[in-house]
Image (cartoon, rainbow, N blue to C red):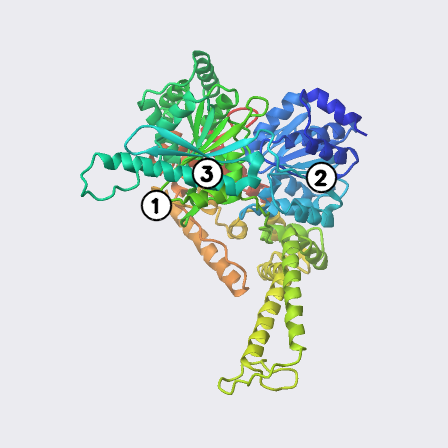
Amino acid sequence: MTADIDEYERSCGYRLDPFQRIAMSHVEAGASVLVSAPTGSGKTAIAEFAIDRALRAGKRAFYTTPIKALSNQKHRDLTARYGTSKVGLLTGDHSILPNAPVVVMTTEVLRNMCYEGKEALSSLAVAVLDEVHYLQDSERGAVWEETIMQLDSQVRLVCLSATVSNADEFGRWISSVHGRVEVVADDKRPVPLDHSYLVGLKQRSELHKIGLAHSDDLGARKTWTRRAKRALSRLDHSATQASASGSSRNARRPRSPLRTPRRHEVIRYLSKGGGLPAIYFLFSRAACDDAVRQCVDQGLALSTVEQSEACLAMASEILAPLSEQDRDVLGIEEFVWSLGLGFGAHHAGMVPIAKTVVEECFAAGNLPVVFATETLAMGINMPAKTVVLERLTKYDGTTHRLLRGSDYAQLTGRAGRRGLDRRGESLIMYDRWTDLSEVLDLVYTRAFPLRSSFRPSYNMVANLVARHDVSEIERILRASFAQFQADERADRLAEQLTGLQDDGHREPDDGTRDGGGRDEPGERDGEGTRPNSRERRRLRRIRWIQRDIDSLRGELIDVFRRQYALLERLGYLEGGSLTGRGIQLRHVHGDTELIAIEALNGAVFDGPVENVAALASALVYQGRRDDVTVHYGSQTLQSSLQKLDNCWVATTASENHGRVTPTRELDASLAGAVQAWASGSSFATLAETSGIAAGDLVRHLRQVADLLRQLDAADPDGQFGKAERLVMRGLVRPFDPAS
């Protein structure tokens, strides 16, 4: 049974790890698999093995990813393996060979295919769900659960996940809804990782490295902790003594001489010590851009002549479609100059075409340093020898919080290039606001539980009603991973409840009963006597636990029933079947999906086509900062926006009345800018007047185009298709056949 595995091993040119062979043996036996292993450990090889087997059998294989950028990368990788005629791409805004034997797609595309019926999935043998742990994403996580539940049980699943500590629980759930899945978990990194603390001294330019752990020796935490604390204390003491020796005897004890190393110092340190290439994580877009400028201003030049020429050639080829005006507004000249010296930035504020240049240059080994936000750790294959973390705290939109263990593992997963580095390194910068014990907790934690974020949506309800009756829908919802986890929590509470109830059947104690307070309703024992204070607490605890159990068992069904009743009242359902509006709702998804269909049927989208695009902007935009320059566009558009807002007010009133979580407020801050873009305005003008980063602007315009495509599917006779074409131009349009 291992002949195919041996053949695959010979074709890939390296020895497979034990966990890869085990997973492949399950695939060879025709089973589904869930593989949980560290970033960079080679999980993709298992997916390729499954795809190979599907193709040999004359069947199709789908490879899904959570983000378009990763889909683009996987399309390039699989095209290189199987050839351009055999690999397609579907990402919403781009379609290449959709009927090919192998199709790479975002997970939403596969989810939608599941709802379309069996014809869309004919001949499908294997579905790869890469980065399947995204099902805990608060905004999009439900997509993965819907997909797993809706796929035919004959389709084999290959679920690939970063290390999670409850893989067995997740595997039990998949087995319960899709069929038997074999769980293969491995926490060994293919390239061992050294975790270190880098400390600077205020009085000197030197940097000191303190070891914190080795990934292959995580059981020795106490020893490493003792060494690290001792080293940090010695460094603090000796530097303090040296600083104080030149001061007067009566002077106050100086503040700590330790400091956070400066970015250019760290880069020099890595360059001299053979620590490049490196990814330097900063949790701020502005900080990434500033770091590049600081290194250039310091006169640093890391690239060899060959690397520099390769980067410049790559940039010239990829950036060729840009106009001179776009180049000026994007600062392309400065960007390319920095690349030639060995520095690049990578963050969501950059336009996709510029990020692609950085990714390609770094992946080719021609860019020594990339300063990046955490978005770089979201699946893009860009391994480095060293990963640097300047801070262990990040702003989550509300407050600054310490990274979670899963965050740290995801970021440092990029360190260590398989086949190139004997060891990788994670360098954590000293920060006086973060205690060493907190740093060590992050390094040593191995608790990465996967938690479901599944909740029914209006679109989900409409798609389920199209194929199932109410009782079957409720059965499907009860089969979700969210309900699976809720039931397990409820079972644990039920055990507590049984223990408390058993306590009540024991002989009562001889303590006196309370004669003071009044009884609370229901707080009498079985014979109607007034319980004492201990008994009252027991009865109250029983009530609380029972309430929690009931909530856990029935919350999802309750949400569904309220949404179903609301859709009936609003005319989307009649007699258990979808009306015309309900059918339209099947095509539109997102957090404002119901408002979009209400507006569609309320003639809100009637008017100039550029206004249609602007109204879509109000439905998808969510402002996060106060520095956006608000443009509401023409008087006609303002009137339409008022109608859209009235639609939101009426719909949320119905939601509140039906005890359904109301749709979030709409944000028309960029509606005028989108109107101008759809009317032919240049990107340079838009970027200069909108007040948001160019990358954010491109992403928003693509989101607008995506909603317009959905609305066009819901109402092909409207102007949505034309509006989408007006938006998808210039920098907004994918710039090469694979993006």
Element type at marker 1?
loop
Q: What crowding class fits label 3: few (fewer than 14 Cα within 10 Å), some (14-19), or many (20 or more)?
A: some
In whole angstroms, how far apart are the C-alphas of marks 1 and 3?
46 Å
Q: Nearer the viewer, mark 1 or mark 2?
A: 2
Name the foreground residue: 429 vs 695: 429
The image shows residue 391 at horizontal and vertical percentages of 41, 39
Upstream in sequence: badge 1 or badge 3: 3
Amino acid, disc 2: Val
- The crowd level at tag 2 (other Cα within 10 Å; few <14, some 14-19, many 20+) is many
Q: Is residue 612 visible?
A: no
Residue 97 x, y percent position in the rendering: 65, 27
Judging depth in this view, the residue of 669 and 282 nearest the camera is: 282
Foreground label between 2 and 3: 3
Q: Earlier in the sequence, mark 2 or mark 3?
A: 2
Identify the residue at the far top of this view.
305
Q: Earlier in the sequence, mark 1 or mark 2?
A: 2
Q: Nearer the viewer, residue 310 or 499?
A: 499
Q: Which residue is mark 3?
A: 227
Mark 1, residues whose alpha carbon is within 10 Å: few (<14), some, or many (≥20)?
Answer: few
- Measuring from the top left, give residue 167's x and y in whole percent: 65, 45
Q: Is residue 455 visible?
A: yes
Left or right relative to 523: residue 491? right
At a point 52% along the width and 20% down the height, the residue shown is 364
Residue 671 falls in which quadrant of the image?
A: top left
Q: Which residue is mark 1?
A: 626
| Amino acid at dot 1 | Asp
Is 53 located above or below residue 531 in the figure? above
Residue bearing the label numbered 2 = 33
Q: Is residue 558 above or below residue 462?
A: below
What SS does tag 2 mark? strand
Q: Position of residue 483 (x, y in %)?
A: 64, 56
Quadrant in which the N terminus is drawn: top right
